[in-house]
Amino acid sequence: MKATCPRLVIAGTGSGVGKTSIALGLARALSDQGLRVQTFKVGPDFLDPTHLAVASGRTCYNLDGWMTSQAYVRQLFARTTAEADIAIIEGVMGLFDGATARTLEGSTAEIALWLDAPVLLIVDAHGVARSLAATVKGFVEFQPGLRVAGVIANQGGSPRHRAWLAESLSDVTPVPLVGMLARGSLPSLPSRHLGLVAAEQAGVAHEVYARLAAACAEQVDLAAIVALARSAGSFEVEGPPLPPPESRRIRVGLARDEAFSFYYPDNLELLAHFGVEWVPFSPLSDSRLPEDLAGLYLGGGYPELHAERLAANFRMREGIRRFAASGRVVYAECGGLMYLGQTLTTHQGVCHPMVGVVPIHTAMLPRIKTLRYAEVCWATDTIWGRAGETARGHEFHYSEIIRRDESIDRWQPAYHLRGRGDELVSGGFCNKNVIAGYMHLHWASRPESAHHFVESCENGR
Protein backbone atom coordinates (compact mmCIF):
# COMPACT_ATOMS: atom_id res chain seq x y z
CA MET A 1 0.00 0.00 0.00
CA LYS A 2 1.20 3.51 -0.78
CA ALA A 3 0.14 6.74 1.00
CA THR A 4 -0.29 9.58 -1.47
CA CYS A 5 -2.65 12.02 0.25
CA PRO A 6 -1.41 15.64 0.53
CA ARG A 7 -0.85 16.39 4.19
CA LEU A 8 0.11 19.14 6.59
CA VAL A 9 0.94 19.06 10.30
CA ILE A 10 -0.43 22.01 12.29
CA ALA A 11 2.13 22.43 15.08
CA GLY A 12 2.73 25.06 17.73
CA THR A 13 5.67 26.55 19.54
CA GLY A 14 3.80 25.48 22.70
CA SER A 15 0.36 24.86 24.12
CA GLY A 16 -2.14 27.70 23.94
CA VAL A 17 -0.96 29.32 20.71
CA GLY A 18 -4.18 28.49 18.82
CA LYS A 19 -3.40 25.16 17.12
CA THR A 20 -6.88 23.72 17.63
CA SER A 21 -8.79 26.81 16.51
CA ILE A 22 -6.63 27.21 13.41
CA ALA A 23 -6.80 23.48 12.57
CA LEU A 24 -10.58 23.64 12.89
CA GLY A 25 -10.77 26.78 10.77
CA LEU A 26 -8.57 25.33 8.05
CA ALA A 27 -10.45 22.01 8.03
CA ARG A 28 -13.82 23.74 7.65
CA ALA A 29 -12.54 26.33 5.14
CA LEU A 30 -10.99 23.66 2.91
CA SER A 31 -14.14 21.53 3.22
CA ASP A 32 -16.17 24.55 2.15
CA GLN A 33 -14.04 24.67 -1.00
CA GLY A 34 -15.19 21.14 -1.82
CA LEU A 35 -12.11 19.24 -0.62
CA ARG A 36 -12.49 15.98 1.29
CA VAL A 37 -10.51 16.77 4.44
CA GLN A 38 -9.30 13.95 6.69
CA THR A 39 -8.28 15.15 10.15
CA PHE A 40 -5.97 13.66 12.76
CA LYS A 41 -4.89 14.58 16.27
CA VAL A 42 -1.44 13.76 17.61
CA GLY A 43 -1.37 12.21 21.08
CA PRO A 44 -3.87 10.76 23.56
CA ASP A 45 -6.70 13.27 23.20
CA PHE A 46 -10.41 12.38 23.22
CA LEU A 47 -11.82 15.92 22.97
CA ASP A 48 -10.14 17.89 20.17
CA PRO A 49 -10.93 15.05 17.72
CA THR A 50 -14.67 15.50 18.28
CA HIS A 51 -14.41 19.09 17.03
CA LEU A 52 -12.14 18.18 14.13
CA ALA A 53 -14.65 15.52 13.08
CA VAL A 54 -17.50 18.03 13.04
CA ALA A 55 -15.44 20.65 11.21
CA SER A 56 -14.38 18.21 8.47
CA GLY A 57 -17.45 15.97 8.33
CA ARG A 58 -15.25 12.87 8.71
CA THR A 59 -14.12 10.75 11.68
CA CYS A 60 -10.94 12.13 13.25
CA TYR A 61 -8.22 9.66 14.26
CA ASN A 62 -5.42 9.90 16.83
CA LEU A 63 -1.81 9.37 15.79
CA ASP A 64 0.33 8.43 18.78
CA GLY A 65 3.96 7.46 18.46
CA TRP A 66 4.35 6.23 22.04
CA MET A 67 1.23 4.11 22.44
CA THR A 68 1.44 2.59 18.96
CA SER A 69 4.27 2.31 16.41
CA GLN A 70 5.60 3.85 13.22
CA ALA A 71 4.21 1.00 11.11
CA TYR A 72 0.77 1.37 12.70
CA VAL A 73 0.68 5.17 12.31
CA ARG A 74 1.61 4.92 8.63
CA GLN A 75 -0.92 2.13 8.01
CA LEU A 76 -3.71 4.04 9.77
CA PHE A 77 -2.91 7.20 7.83
CA ALA A 78 -2.85 5.40 4.49
CA ARG A 79 -6.09 3.55 5.17
CA THR A 80 -8.09 6.55 6.37
CA THR A 81 -6.84 8.97 3.69
CA ALA A 82 -7.39 6.66 0.72
CA GLU A 83 -10.41 8.69 -0.39
CA ALA A 84 -9.39 12.10 0.97
CA ASP A 85 -8.06 15.12 -0.90
CA ILE A 86 -6.00 16.55 1.95
CA ALA A 87 -5.06 15.61 5.52
CA ILE A 88 -4.87 18.12 8.37
CA ILE A 89 -2.93 16.79 11.38
CA GLU A 90 -3.23 18.82 14.59
CA GLY A 91 -0.21 18.50 16.85
CA VAL A 92 0.03 18.24 20.63
CA MET A 93 1.71 20.77 22.95
CA GLY A 94 4.82 22.24 21.31
CA LEU A 95 6.28 20.73 18.14
CA PHE A 96 9.04 18.85 19.98
CA ASP A 97 7.22 18.03 23.25
CA GLY A 98 6.47 14.37 23.88
CA ALA A 99 6.99 11.44 26.20
CA THR A 100 10.57 12.25 27.19
CA ALA A 101 12.76 15.32 27.60
CA ARG A 102 15.54 14.07 25.34
CA THR A 103 13.86 12.34 22.40
CA LEU A 104 11.05 12.95 19.89
CA GLU A 105 9.10 9.95 21.23
CA GLY A 106 5.39 10.76 21.42
CA SER A 107 5.84 14.22 19.86
CA THR A 108 4.28 16.02 16.92
CA ALA A 109 7.71 16.15 15.27
CA GLU A 110 7.95 12.35 15.41
CA ILE A 111 4.64 11.97 13.56
CA ALA A 112 5.67 14.58 10.97
CA LEU A 113 8.89 12.67 10.29
CA TRP A 114 7.12 9.30 10.12
CA LEU A 115 4.60 10.66 7.59
CA ASP A 116 7.12 12.80 5.68
CA ALA A 117 4.72 15.69 6.28
CA PRO A 118 5.52 19.41 6.03
CA VAL A 119 4.89 21.40 9.20
CA LEU A 120 2.85 24.60 9.48
CA LEU A 121 4.13 26.32 12.62
CA ILE A 122 1.71 28.42 14.71
CA VAL A 123 3.46 31.21 16.64
CA ASP A 124 1.96 33.69 19.11
CA ALA A 125 2.79 37.10 17.62
CA HIS A 126 1.38 39.25 20.39
CA GLY A 127 4.01 41.81 21.43
CA VAL A 128 6.76 40.59 19.09
CA ALA A 129 8.13 41.52 15.68
CA ARG A 130 11.65 40.41 14.67
CA SER A 131 11.78 38.10 17.69
CA LEU A 132 9.28 35.88 15.91
CA ALA A 133 11.90 35.22 13.24
CA ALA A 134 14.38 34.13 15.91
CA THR A 135 11.82 31.70 17.32
CA VAL A 136 11.02 30.25 13.91
CA LYS A 137 14.70 29.95 13.00
CA GLY A 138 15.27 27.87 16.12
CA PHE A 139 12.40 25.55 15.29
CA VAL A 140 13.53 25.22 11.65
CA GLU A 141 17.08 24.22 12.58
CA PHE A 142 16.40 22.16 15.73
CA GLN A 143 15.69 18.76 14.16
CA PRO A 144 17.50 17.63 10.98
CA GLY A 145 15.15 16.14 8.42
CA LEU A 146 12.04 17.90 9.75
CA ARG A 147 10.60 20.42 7.29
CA VAL A 148 8.94 23.50 8.74
CA ALA A 149 7.30 24.73 5.54
CA GLY A 150 5.19 27.69 6.63
CA VAL A 151 4.25 29.95 9.52
CA ILE A 152 0.97 31.37 10.77
CA ALA A 153 1.22 34.21 13.28
CA ASN A 154 -1.66 34.24 15.74
CA GLN A 155 -2.77 37.14 17.95
CA GLY A 156 -1.35 39.63 15.47
CA GLY A 157 -2.02 43.34 15.17
CA SER A 158 -2.14 45.75 12.22
CA PRO A 159 -1.30 45.14 8.56
CA ARG A 160 2.01 46.86 9.29
CA HIS A 161 2.67 44.27 12.01
CA ARG A 162 2.10 41.51 9.47
CA ALA A 163 4.51 43.15 7.03
CA TRP A 164 7.22 43.38 9.70
CA LEU A 165 6.76 39.71 10.61
CA ALA A 166 7.02 38.64 6.95
CA GLU A 167 10.10 40.82 6.39
CA SER A 168 11.90 39.54 9.48
CA LEU A 169 11.20 35.93 8.51
CA SER A 170 12.50 36.42 4.97
CA ASP A 171 15.77 37.82 6.37
CA VAL A 172 16.70 34.67 8.31
CA THR A 173 14.80 31.71 6.85
CA PRO A 174 13.13 30.65 3.58
CA VAL A 175 10.00 29.65 5.50
CA PRO A 176 7.15 31.97 4.43
CA LEU A 177 4.50 33.66 6.54
CA VAL A 178 1.27 32.29 5.05
CA GLY A 179 -1.11 34.09 7.38
CA MET A 180 -1.60 36.31 10.40
CA LEU A 181 -4.74 36.07 12.50
CA ALA A 182 -5.58 39.29 14.26
CA ARG A 183 -6.33 39.36 17.97
CA GLY A 184 -10.00 38.63 18.65
CA SER A 185 -10.72 37.12 15.23
CA LEU A 186 -11.01 33.53 16.50
CA PRO A 187 -14.07 32.67 18.63
CA SER A 188 -13.35 30.74 21.81
CA LEU A 189 -14.32 27.11 22.32
CA PRO A 190 -15.93 25.89 25.59
CA SER A 191 -13.64 24.01 27.99
CA ARG A 192 -13.69 22.28 31.37
CA HIS A 193 -11.25 20.43 33.63
CA LEU A 194 -10.15 17.77 31.11
CA GLY A 195 -9.80 20.22 28.21
CA LEU A 196 -12.28 21.27 25.55
CA VAL A 197 -15.87 20.20 25.97
CA ALA A 198 -16.61 17.44 23.45
CA ALA A 199 -18.33 18.82 20.37
CA GLU A 200 -21.50 16.77 20.80
CA GLN A 201 -21.81 17.85 24.44
CA ALA A 202 -20.81 21.49 24.07
CA GLY A 203 -23.68 22.36 21.79
CA VAL A 204 -21.19 24.28 19.67
CA ALA A 205 -23.19 25.88 16.92
CA HIS A 206 -21.98 25.35 13.37
CA GLU A 207 -21.77 29.13 13.32
CA VAL A 208 -18.61 28.84 15.51
CA TYR A 209 -16.90 26.56 12.99
CA ALA A 210 -18.09 28.88 10.22
CA ARG A 211 -16.52 31.86 12.00
CA LEU A 212 -13.25 29.98 12.43
CA ALA A 213 -13.31 29.08 8.74
CA ALA A 214 -14.11 32.67 7.73
CA ALA A 215 -11.20 34.01 9.79
CA CYS A 216 -8.81 31.56 8.15
CA ALA A 217 -10.18 32.20 4.66
CA GLU A 218 -9.76 35.96 5.11
CA GLN A 219 -6.41 36.05 6.89
CA VAL A 220 -4.57 32.93 5.69
CA ASP A 221 -3.47 32.11 2.15
CA LEU A 222 -5.48 28.91 1.63
CA ALA A 223 -3.94 28.32 -1.79
CA ALA A 224 -0.51 28.33 -0.14
CA ILE A 225 -1.79 25.89 2.51
CA VAL A 226 -2.93 23.45 -0.16
CA ALA A 227 0.36 23.87 -2.04
CA LEU A 228 2.36 23.10 1.11
CA ALA A 229 0.29 19.97 1.72
CA ARG A 230 0.78 18.85 -1.88
CA SER A 231 4.54 19.23 -1.51
CA ALA A 232 4.55 16.07 0.62
CA GLY A 233 5.67 13.03 -1.31
CA SER A 234 4.19 9.54 -1.26
CA PHE A 235 5.54 6.73 0.91
CA GLU A 236 5.26 2.97 1.02
CA VAL A 237 3.45 1.49 4.00
CA GLU A 238 5.35 -1.24 5.79
CA GLY A 239 4.39 -3.80 8.39
CA PRO A 240 2.27 -6.94 8.36
CA PRO A 241 -1.39 -6.43 7.49
CA LEU A 242 -4.13 -7.58 9.81
CA PRO A 243 -5.46 -11.07 9.21
CA PRO A 244 -8.75 -11.29 7.30
CA PRO A 245 -11.70 -9.99 9.34
CA GLU A 246 -13.60 -12.50 11.44
CA SER A 247 -16.98 -13.59 10.10
CA ARG A 248 -18.36 -14.20 13.60
CA ARG A 249 -20.22 -11.37 15.32
CA ILE A 250 -20.04 -11.01 19.10
CA ARG A 251 -22.42 -8.38 20.45
CA VAL A 252 -20.73 -6.07 22.97
CA GLY A 253 -22.51 -3.21 24.69
CA LEU A 254 -20.73 0.15 24.38
CA ALA A 255 -21.61 2.82 26.96
CA ARG A 256 -22.02 5.97 24.87
CA ASP A 257 -23.72 9.17 25.98
CA GLU A 258 -22.86 12.50 27.63
CA ALA A 259 -21.20 10.67 30.55
CA PHE A 260 -19.17 8.10 28.56
CA SER A 261 -17.57 9.05 25.25
CA PHE A 262 -13.79 8.57 25.46
CA TYR A 263 -12.97 5.97 22.82
CA TYR A 264 -10.34 5.81 20.08
CA PRO A 265 -12.20 5.13 16.80
CA ASP A 266 -9.46 2.85 15.52
CA ASN A 267 -9.59 0.85 18.78
CA LEU A 268 -13.27 0.17 18.15
CA GLU A 269 -12.56 -0.61 14.48
CA LEU A 270 -9.80 -3.04 15.46
CA LEU A 271 -12.14 -4.95 17.77
CA ALA A 272 -14.85 -4.93 15.08
CA HIS A 273 -12.30 -6.46 12.70
CA PHE A 274 -11.88 -9.35 15.13
CA GLY A 275 -15.63 -9.93 15.42
CA VAL A 276 -17.18 -7.39 17.80
CA GLU A 277 -20.55 -5.94 16.87
CA TRP A 278 -20.82 -2.73 18.89
CA VAL A 279 -24.22 -2.12 20.46
CA PRO A 280 -24.36 1.42 21.92
CA PHE A 281 -26.41 2.06 25.06
CA SER A 282 -26.81 4.93 27.50
CA PRO A 283 -26.24 4.44 31.24
CA LEU A 284 -27.93 7.81 31.65
CA SER A 285 -31.13 7.31 29.67
CA ASP A 286 -31.74 3.61 28.98
CA SER A 287 -33.60 1.58 31.57
CA ARG A 288 -32.04 -1.74 30.56
CA LEU A 289 -29.10 -3.19 28.70
CA PRO A 290 -29.50 -4.29 25.07
CA GLU A 291 -30.41 -7.93 24.54
CA ASP A 292 -28.04 -10.81 23.83
CA LEU A 293 -24.76 -9.15 24.85
CA ALA A 294 -21.56 -11.11 25.39
CA GLY A 295 -19.67 -8.22 26.96
CA LEU A 296 -19.72 -4.60 28.14
CA TYR A 297 -17.21 -1.81 27.49
CA LEU A 298 -17.54 1.23 29.78
CA GLY A 299 -15.14 3.90 28.54
CA GLY A 300 -14.03 7.16 30.08
CA GLY A 301 -15.84 10.46 30.10
CA TYR A 302 -17.53 12.71 32.63
CA PRO A 303 -19.55 10.55 35.06
CA GLU A 304 -18.88 13.18 37.75
CA LEU A 305 -20.92 15.75 35.82
CA HIS A 306 -23.88 13.37 35.52
CA ALA A 307 -23.55 11.48 38.81
CA GLU A 308 -27.06 12.35 40.00
CA ARG A 309 -28.68 11.01 36.83
CA LEU A 310 -26.46 7.92 36.81
CA ALA A 311 -27.39 7.21 40.43
CA ALA A 312 -31.10 7.77 39.74
CA ASN A 313 -31.09 5.20 36.92
CA PHE A 314 -31.43 2.29 39.36
CA ARG A 315 -32.62 -0.18 36.73
CA MET A 316 -29.50 0.29 34.64
CA ARG A 317 -27.21 0.00 37.68
CA GLU A 318 -28.96 -3.20 38.73
CA GLY A 319 -28.81 -4.55 35.17
CA ILE A 320 -25.05 -4.05 35.00
CA ARG A 321 -24.60 -5.70 38.41
CA ARG A 322 -26.54 -8.74 37.22
CA PHE A 323 -24.57 -8.80 33.97
CA ALA A 324 -21.25 -8.83 35.82
CA ALA A 325 -22.52 -11.55 38.17
CA SER A 326 -23.50 -13.70 35.18
CA GLY A 327 -19.86 -14.29 34.28
CA ARG A 328 -19.93 -12.28 31.06
CA VAL A 329 -17.09 -9.89 30.24
CA VAL A 330 -17.11 -6.37 31.71
CA TYR A 331 -14.29 -3.92 30.94
CA ALA A 332 -14.12 -0.35 32.29
CA GLU A 333 -11.65 2.51 31.85
CA CYS A 334 -11.30 5.62 34.04
CA GLY A 335 -14.84 7.06 34.13
CA GLY A 336 -16.11 3.52 33.64
CA LEU A 337 -14.14 2.44 36.72
CA MET A 338 -15.72 5.26 38.74
CA TYR A 339 -19.17 4.18 37.55
CA LEU A 340 -18.56 0.52 38.47
CA GLY A 341 -17.49 1.53 41.99
CA GLN A 342 -19.65 1.83 45.09
CA THR A 343 -19.95 5.63 45.30
CA LEU A 344 -18.74 8.75 43.50
CA THR A 345 -18.29 12.06 45.33
CA THR A 346 -18.52 15.09 43.04
CA HIS A 347 -16.62 18.39 43.10
CA GLN A 348 -19.54 19.77 45.14
CA GLY A 349 -18.97 17.15 47.86
CA VAL A 350 -22.16 15.20 47.10
CA CYS A 351 -21.81 11.42 47.37
CA HIS A 352 -23.83 9.38 44.84
CA PRO A 353 -24.29 5.59 44.72
CA MET A 354 -22.89 3.94 41.61
CA VAL A 355 -23.18 0.41 40.18
CA GLY A 356 -21.47 -1.36 43.09
CA VAL A 357 -19.46 -4.00 41.23
CA VAL A 358 -15.93 -2.91 42.18
CA PRO A 359 -15.57 -2.40 45.98
CA ILE A 360 -14.06 1.10 45.81
CA HIS A 361 -15.22 4.66 46.45
CA THR A 362 -13.96 7.55 44.29
CA ALA A 363 -14.00 11.32 44.71
CA MET A 364 -13.19 14.29 42.51
CA LEU A 365 -10.20 16.51 43.29
CA PRO A 366 -9.75 20.26 42.71
CA ARG A 367 -6.64 19.65 40.61
CA ILE A 368 -5.32 16.97 38.29
CA LYS A 369 -4.33 13.69 39.95
CA THR A 370 -2.48 11.91 37.16
CA LEU A 371 -1.36 12.70 33.61
CA ARG A 372 1.07 10.22 32.08
CA TYR A 373 1.83 7.61 29.50
CA ALA A 374 2.30 4.16 30.98
CA GLU A 375 2.92 0.58 29.99
CA VAL A 376 1.00 -2.17 31.75
CA CYS A 377 1.99 -5.80 32.26
CA TRP A 378 -0.95 -8.08 33.04
CA ALA A 379 -0.58 -9.43 36.57
CA THR A 380 -2.74 -12.46 35.81
CA ASP A 381 -4.53 -14.07 32.89
CA THR A 382 -7.24 -11.60 31.87
CA ILE A 383 -9.88 -10.99 29.23
CA TRP A 384 -7.22 -9.03 27.25
CA GLY A 385 -4.25 -11.39 27.48
CA ARG A 386 -2.09 -13.68 29.54
CA ALA A 387 0.00 -12.82 32.58
CA GLY A 388 3.22 -11.10 31.57
CA GLU A 389 1.93 -9.67 28.29
CA THR A 390 2.10 -5.89 27.93
CA ALA A 391 0.05 -3.04 26.48
CA ARG A 392 0.46 0.73 26.39
CA GLY A 393 -1.87 3.58 27.20
CA HIS A 394 -2.25 6.74 29.26
CA GLU A 395 -3.89 8.08 32.42
CA PHE A 396 -5.59 11.47 32.72
CA HIS A 397 -7.97 12.06 35.63
CA TYR A 398 -9.03 14.43 38.38
CA SER A 399 -10.42 11.75 40.68
CA GLU A 400 -8.89 9.28 43.12
CA ILE A 401 -9.88 6.20 45.10
CA ILE A 402 -10.59 7.37 48.63
CA ARG A 403 -11.66 4.07 50.21
CA ARG A 404 -11.72 0.33 49.52
CA ASP A 405 -14.24 -2.04 51.09
CA GLU A 406 -13.19 -5.23 52.85
CA SER A 407 -14.40 -7.31 49.91
CA ILE A 408 -11.50 -5.89 47.87
CA ASP A 409 -9.58 -8.93 49.15
CA ARG A 410 -11.50 -11.01 46.60
CA TRP A 411 -10.04 -8.85 43.81
CA GLN A 412 -6.48 -8.70 42.57
CA PRO A 413 -4.47 -6.11 40.64
CA ALA A 414 -5.20 -6.28 36.93
CA TYR A 415 -1.72 -5.16 35.94
CA HIS A 416 1.65 -3.86 36.99
CA LEU A 417 2.19 -0.39 35.65
CA ARG A 418 5.25 1.69 34.90
CA GLY A 419 5.06 5.32 33.87
CA ARG A 420 7.87 7.39 32.40
CA GLY A 421 10.74 6.91 34.84
CA ASP A 422 8.42 5.61 37.55
CA GLU A 423 8.91 2.46 39.57
CA LEU A 424 6.65 -0.52 38.97
CA VAL A 425 3.31 -0.32 40.82
CA SER A 426 0.13 -2.37 40.84
CA GLY A 427 -2.96 -0.96 39.16
CA GLY A 428 -6.49 -1.75 38.12
CA PHE A 429 -8.82 -4.36 39.54
CA CYS A 430 -9.55 -7.84 38.26
CA ASN A 431 -12.06 -10.44 39.40
CA LYS A 432 -12.49 -13.23 36.84
CA ASN A 433 -14.58 -11.68 34.04
CA VAL A 434 -14.37 -8.05 35.24
CA ILE A 435 -11.44 -5.67 34.68
CA ALA A 436 -11.51 -1.99 35.63
CA GLY A 437 -8.78 0.62 35.94
CA TYR A 438 -7.81 4.21 35.32
CA MET A 439 -5.71 3.37 32.25
CA HIS A 440 -6.96 4.19 28.75
CA LEU A 441 -5.28 1.42 26.74
CA HIS A 442 -4.58 1.47 23.01
CA TRP A 443 -4.93 -2.00 21.54
CA ALA A 444 -2.68 -1.24 18.59
CA SER A 445 0.16 -1.56 21.10
CA ARG A 446 -0.72 -5.29 21.13
CA PRO A 447 -3.28 -6.19 18.43
CA GLU A 448 -3.44 -9.77 19.71
CA SER A 449 -5.29 -8.37 22.73
CA ALA A 450 -8.31 -7.57 20.56
CA HIS A 451 -8.53 -11.20 19.43
CA HIS A 452 -8.14 -12.37 23.04
CA PHE A 453 -10.97 -10.05 24.15
CA VAL A 454 -13.34 -11.46 21.53
CA GLU A 455 -12.45 -15.02 22.56
CA SER A 456 -13.11 -14.10 26.21
CA CYS A 457 -16.51 -12.66 25.32
CA GLU A 458 -17.41 -15.75 23.31
CA ASN A 459 -16.34 -18.07 26.12
CA GLY A 460 -18.15 -16.02 28.77
CA ARG A 461 -21.33 -16.05 26.77
Image (cartoon, rainbow, N blue to C red):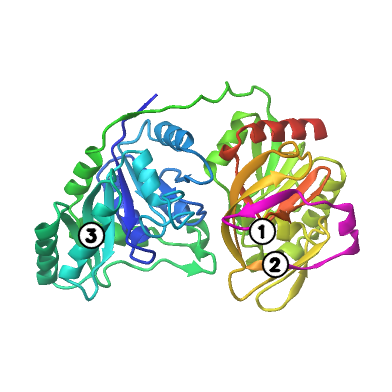
Instruction: Inspect the magenta stretch and tell me whether residue 411 lies in it.
Output: yes
What residue is shown with label 1? Answer: 335
Badge 3 density bin: few <14, some 14–19, many ≥20, Cα 10 Å: many
What residue is shown with label 2? Answer: 400
Question: How far apart are labels 1 and 2 at the CA level?
Answer: 11 Å
Question: How far apart are labels 2 and 3 at the CA level?
Answer: 41 Å
Determine the residue positioned at 33% across, 30% down: 235
Q: Is residue 409 left or right of residue 445?
A: right
Determine the residue positioned at 35% across, 38% down: 115
User: Circle 1 sits in a helix, a strand or a loop, which is it?
Assistant: helix
Q: Is residue 184 left or right of residue 45?
A: left
Q: Which mark is residue 136?
A: 3
Question: How far apart are labels 1 and 3 at the CA level?
Answer: 40 Å
Q: State which quadrant residue 326 falls in.
A: top right
Quarter of the image that includes the N terminus? top left
Give the foreground label among 1 and 2: 2
Residue 49 placement (x, y as % from top left): 46, 52
Residue at the extreme bottom = 348
From what the image shows, is residue 73 above or below residue 122? above
Residue 376 placement (x, y as % from top left): 66, 47
Residue 136 placement (x, y as % from top left): 23, 60
Q: Which amino acid, mark 1?
A: Gly
The answer to which of 300 and 91 lies nearer the viewer is 91
User: Circle 3 sits in a helix, a strand or a loop, which is it?
Assistant: helix
Quarter of the image that includes the C terminus? top right
Magenta residues? Answer: 400-422
Q: Which amino acid, mark 3?
A: Val
Residue 197 placement (x, y as % from top left): 50, 63
Determine the residue positioned at 44% across, 62% down: 204
Does the residue at mark 2 contact the one at mark 3 (Cβ under 8 Å)?
no
